[in-house]
Image (tube, rainbow, N blue to C red):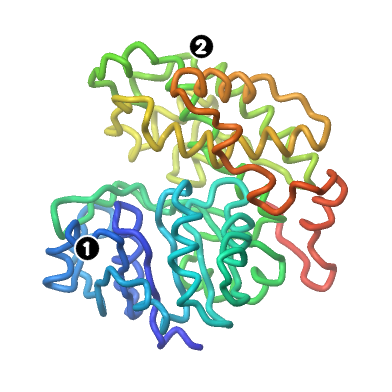
């Protein structure tokens, strides 16, 4: 299959709309799929997305559909949903995929491509390549037909369920998204996620304001030197787990600078100078994707991988425990477990072998 067969975008939230508009702006044939067509009735009527901000214009779509069968002819299927929906999305897509198609995850969190590939196989899908990157746009829906793009990341990593999947498709994806670099493995890619490091500690430090549904600027008013101390301790645990899985993490200050350009000597200054973060408000409930998605899809698998490697993660452990108590949900059970990665019976060394890049393929360091 070739790109001329079309690109399907799954998800019509802020990220999905931004990705669809961006690809359409490059002259690519884009088909938008959502399980809730009524929510994008205006986009479907005109078959276009109106983008404002960092990406501005009116961008034509080939089709808008609520039927996943409409993606069967697409050479590439981009999934821009929340990660907690991956099992459901994989089950919906599985009957309509064909060998040779490529699935690309946006905001896969930790080992999202591994989970998604296993979910597809469990649902009976044929062998398809699954690769992942992070959310590349800070975007939110704007009315029935639009998207406000607050910013576009200038750097990110790409990985996949297998090294071979990445090798086959990295060239095309980097042509579409020039900011992408190759990660050593899905652990390195997944742990280079500032939101996963920051969201839960900042929320816990502002729990009273969130409970009272106060109007709080999450990254500007919700962060203080003491809050940053929690972030830095959490970051240290991320880095230690990364090293145990043959990965290296850049400091979060450098990640933010690569994302949006915010040269700063301290993490506090970096957070406060990221332009797209200045208007983001805090959740008004603990049942918010900032929290539930990062706990289920990053902190839970990180804790499991740490335990396989014999590494202590007291900050991550505490965050999962506190949020499980407050949310009334056992995130260690409902999150991205090793069983959902098909790694449940593997030792630390066996997981390392799964992650290893064959010498013939090589890799790029972050």
The residue depicted at 14 percent of the width and 63 percent of the height is: 41
Rendered location of residue 329, percent (x, y): 49, 28
Give the labeled residue for mark 2: 226
SS of the residue under disc 1: helix
Of all residues, the one furthest to the right in this rendering is: 349
Residue 79 placement, left or right of 19: right
Q: Please tell me whether mark 2 or mark 1 is closer to you in this view.
A: 1
> CA separation, marks 2 and 1?
44 Å
Crowdedness of circle 1 by 10 Å Cα count: few (<14), some, many (20+)?
some
Q: State the residue in front, 41 or 66.
A: 66
Q: Are marks 2 and 1 in contact (CB under 8 Å)?
A: no
Rendered location of residue 238, percent (x, y): 66, 33
Q: State the residue in front, 337 or 207.
A: 337
Give the labeled residue for mark 1: 37
| Residue 222 vertical placement versus 248 (above, below) | above
| Residue 13 vertical placement versus 72 (above, below) | above
User: Image quadrant of residue 69?
Assistant: bottom left
Q: State the residue in front, 208 or 90.
A: 90
Rendered location of residue 113, percent (x, y): 59, 58
Rendered location of residue 347, percent (x, y): 85, 45
SS of the residue under disc 2: helix
Residue 314 placement, left or right of 96: right
Q: State the residue in front, 151 or 28.
A: 28
The disc, 2 or 1, on the residue closer to the chain's N-terminal end is 1
User: Image quadrant of residue 218?
Assistant: top left
The residue depicted at 34 percent of the width and 59 percent of the height is: 11
User: Image quadrant of residue 96?
Assistant: bottom left
């Amino acid at each position: 299959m070739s790109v001329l067969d079309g690109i399907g975008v799954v998800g019509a939230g802020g990220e999905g709309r931004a990705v669809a508009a961006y690809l359409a702006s490059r002259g690519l044939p884009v088909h938008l799929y959502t399980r809730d067509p009524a929510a994008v009735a205006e986009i479907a009527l005109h078959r276009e997305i109106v983008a404002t901000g960092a990406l501005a214009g009116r961008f034509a779509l080939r089709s808008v559909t609520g039927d996943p069968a409409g993606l069967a002819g697409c050479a590439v299927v981009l999934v821009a949903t929340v990660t907690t929906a991956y099992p459901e999305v994989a089950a919906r897509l599985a009957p309509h995929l064909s060998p040779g198609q490529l699935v690309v995850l946006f905001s896969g969190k930790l080992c999202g491509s591994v989970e998604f590939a296993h979910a597809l196989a469990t649902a009976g899908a044929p062998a398809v390549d699954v690769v992942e990157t992070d959310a590349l746009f800070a975007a939110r829906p704007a009315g029935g037909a639009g998207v406000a793009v607050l910013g576009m990341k200038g750097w990110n990593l790409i990985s996949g369920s297998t090294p071979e999947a990445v090798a086959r498709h990295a060239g095309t994806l980097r042509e579409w998204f020039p900011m992408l670099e190759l990660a050593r493995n899905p652990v390195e890619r997944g742990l280079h996620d500032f939101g996963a490091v920051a969201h839960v500690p900042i929320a816990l430090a502002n729990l009273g304001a969130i409970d009272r549904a106060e109007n709080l600027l999450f990254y500007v008013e919700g962060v203080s030197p003491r809050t940053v101390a929690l972030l830095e301790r959490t970051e240290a645990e991320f880095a230690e787990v990364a090293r145990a899985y043959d990965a290296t993490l850049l400091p979060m200050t450098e990640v933010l600078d690569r994302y949006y350009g915010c040269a700063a000597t301290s993490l506090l200054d970096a957070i406060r100078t990221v332009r797209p973060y200045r208007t983001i408000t805090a959740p008004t409930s603990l049942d918010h994707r900032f929290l539930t998605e990062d706990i289920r899809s990053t902190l839970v698998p990180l804790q499991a991988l740490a335990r396989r490697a014999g590494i202590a993660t007291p900050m991550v452990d505490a965050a999962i425990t506190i949020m499980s108590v407050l949310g009334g949900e056992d995130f260690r059970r409902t999150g991205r477990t090793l069983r959902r990665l098909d790694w449940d019976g593997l030792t630390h060394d066996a997981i390392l072998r799964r992650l290893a890049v064959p010498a013939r393929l090589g890799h790029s360091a972050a």
